[in-house]
Image (cartoon, rainbow, N blue to C red):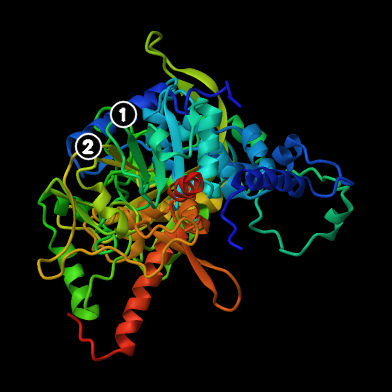
Amino acid sequence: MYVAVKGGETAILNSYKLLAEQRRGDTAHAELTIDQIRQQLKLSVDRVMTEGSVYDPELAALAIKQASGDLVEAIFLLRAYRATLPRLGNTCALDTTRMQLDRRISATFKDLPGGQVLGPTYDYTQRLLDFSLLANAQELESPTTNPASPLPQTVSSVPSVPRVVDLLNQEGLIERTDRSGHDPAPRDLTREPLRFPADRATRLQNIARGDEGFLLAMAYSTQRGYSHSHPFVGEVRLGQVAVEIEPEELGFALSIGEIEITECEMVNQFAGSKTEPPQFTRGYGLAFGQSERKAMAMSLVDRALRAEELGEPIESPAQMQEFVLSHSDSLEASGFVQHLKLPHYVDFQSELELVRKMRARLSNPDETPV
Amino acid sequence: MNAPEVNFAYLDERTKRMIRRAILKAVAIPGYQVPFGSREMPLPYGWGTGGIQVTASVIGPHDTLKVIDQGSDDTVNAVNIRRFFERTAGVNTTTRTQEATLIQTRHRIPELPLVEGQIIVYQVPVPEPMQRLEPRETETRTLHGLAEYGLMHVKLYEDIARYGHIATTYDYPVMVNHRYIMSPSPIPKFDNPKMHMNPALQLFGAGREKRIYAVPPYTAVESLAFEDHPFEIQQWQAACAQCGATDSFLDEVILDDAGGRMHVCSDSDYCQTRQDTKEQV
C-alpha cells in the first residue's frame, strides 16, 4: 500500500544516532582525542584550516574528528562556524621575509642568501609502507646537524631572508607589483559575493579557499598544454610568521601571535608585449600550515588566470576566471552535486510525462507535429 | 528546543540587514537578480541555503512557518529545515497552507491559492535562466541589461522545430513585469500560472549562486510561449487515488514490481484537507 513519506523526523534522529556509532567505531579501542589529531594528523589539520579559512588547529582537529576524517566535511563544519563570527579588524600584510623558516627551497638557484633548507618533507621519502608504525611505538631519531643545511634554530636567528624573486628583481628581470603608495583593502569574499571580472586579490582569495584537488588538476592542465606557462619554482617556504595589527589609536603595529604558513612564488617566462620587455612573471600561492601541494597549485592557477592582464589569448579552462573561480569551492561543488540525493519526484514526474508524450508521437507517425 | 547560543533565526542581525536590503532591491526591480553576500549556513549549499537565509531574514517571532519540499511537509529535507527554524527561532510551524504566514518551498507552489500578507520563499538552485545557454555570468548580465532575450526564444523555437512542442517541463522560464526573464525555480510548469498576479509576496533565494530576486504581489508573470504555440500545463488521465482530486499536480507512485502504479497529490496538505472534508460529509 502507498506509504507516504511520513516519519522523516524520526528517520533523521535515528540517522544521527547511527552516525555517532559509526564515528566512534568499536568501543574496545580508545577514543581518538583532539590532541592526537592535532599532533599526529597535522597535514589534515593544515588543509582543513586553509580551506576552512580559520587558523585554529584545535577547532580544525575537532572538525576532523566530528567528520570521521572526511576533510571536505570538516572544512564545511569550520566554515559554518566562522560564518557568523564578528570581524574585529584587519591585520597588517604578512611580511614573509621575516619568517622563521622550517623549510625553504628554490628550484631556480643552487645556492642563495639564507640557504636551502630541506626541513620536514615527504619529498625524498621512499614510499615503502613502514611496518614499524604498525607496532605503535616509534622511536624518534633527532636530526644530525649538517653545516651545509642549517637547522631551524640557526635560520631563526637570521632576521630577514629575502625572497628569491626579489633577488631577480634587482636586475629588473621580473615584473614588479605596483602597490601605488598603499595597499588597497581587499574584498572579503565571505561577506560580498564574487563578481566578474574579479581582480587579482579577489581571485587569490577565492583560490586560497579553493579545493586542493580541483586546483591541483587545473594547475596540472597548464603543464600539459592547456595554457602552457613554463613555470619554475622560484621558492617554496614554510615557517612561522608574525601576525600584526595596527590599532588606529596606537599608530604602530602590535604582534598578536604567530601562524605557520606555506608560501610559493612561481616564476614564469613571458615573451614580452608591445609595452613590456621580455621578463619573468609571477604566480603566487599561500596556505596555512604545511600545504605545499596546495600552495604550488595555487600559484600556477594564479599565473594562468593573469592571462587577460598580460595580453595572452584565453583559450584554456585554467585561464578562464568564471570557469575556475565559480567551481573551485568544495562546499559549493559538494553541496550541489550531492543535492541530487534530495527528492526530485516533481521534476521527474514532469519529465516522465514529456518522454511519454514524445514516444507516443514516434509510435504514431500519422500525427504530424503541429 | 530553543538553542539560546545562536541568534534568533541563526543569522546575526547585520547579516539579516544586508539580506533585507537585497530583498528590498529585488522587490523594487521584479525579476532582477540581486547579488548578495551569501553566508555559509550549517546546511549544505544546494539544499536550500538561499531560501533559508531569506526566511531567516524576514521571519519574526509571531510568524507561522510552513516548509515543503516537492509539495510535501514530510520529506526529510523539509523536516530538516523546519526543525532548523524550530530550534533557532522557536516559531510556530504548520503544515496548513492557509495558517502559514511564511512558506518556504522547494519545487512546488501549494495548490491552495495564496492570499495577501503571505510570503512564499522559493529555494533556487540556478537563478540564471540562460545559464545552460550561456554559462558566463558577465555575458548573461549584459543580456538582461539590454533585455536581449533572443537566445532563449531561439532555444524554445528549436524545441518546437525538433519535437513539435517546447520540451521544458519544470523551471520553465517566465517574463516578469514585462521586463526580466526569470527562473521560477524548478517548479513544474503546472505551477507557473499561479505566480501571475499572485496576492502574496514571492521571494527567491539562491545561496550557492549568491542571488536574491522577487516577484511583488500582483505582478505580471508570463510563461514564455509563441502565438501559435501557446503555453500549456501538464494534464493527467488519472485522479488522485487518495482524495480524488483532478485539479492538482499528481505524483506517480509505483506499487509493485509488476508495473502497478497509482497517482497521488504532490501537495500533501491539499490532499489531506480534501480527505478530512470527505470524512466529515
Q: Which mark is residue B20?
A: 1
Residue at (60, 35) in percent of width and height: A155
Q: Is residue A159 visible?
A: yes
Helix, strand or loop under label 2:
loop
Q: Relative to A300, does residue B57 appear above or below in the rendering? A: above
Residue at (51, 53) in percent of width and height: A212
Specify the amino acid type for callout 2: Pro
Helix, strand or loop under label 1:
helix
Q: Which residue is under mark 2? A: B217
Residue sitting nearer the eye, A7 or A115:
A7
Residue at (51, 55) in percent of width and height: A342
Q: Is residue A242 visible?
A: no
Asked if labels 1 and 2 touch by Cβ distance under 8 angstroms, the answer is no
Check the image and name the residue furthest to the bottom. A366
Specify the amino acid type for callout 1: Arg
Residue sitting nearer the eye, A57 or A20:
A20
Q: Relative to A129, does residue A61 appear above or below in the rendering? A: above
* Chain under disc 1: B
Check the image and name the residue furthest to the front. B281
Residue at (29, 30) in percent of width and height: B117
Residue sitting nearer the eye, A343 or B230:
B230
Kindly indicate the quadrant of the structure image that contains residue A278.
bottom left
Q: Relative to A104, does residue A161 appear above or below in the rendering? A: above
Q: In this view, does A250 lie to the left or right of B159?
A: right
Q: Distance between the residues labelled 2 and 1?
A: 17 Å
Mark 2 neighbour class, 10 Å CA radius: few under 14, some 14 to 19, many 20 or more: many
* Chain under disc 2: B
Locate the C terminus of chain A and report the quarter of the image it occupies.
bottom left
Foreground label between 2 and 1: 2
Horizontal and vertical percent for residue B269?
Answer: 46, 46
Horizontal and vertical percent for residue B169?
Answer: 31, 65
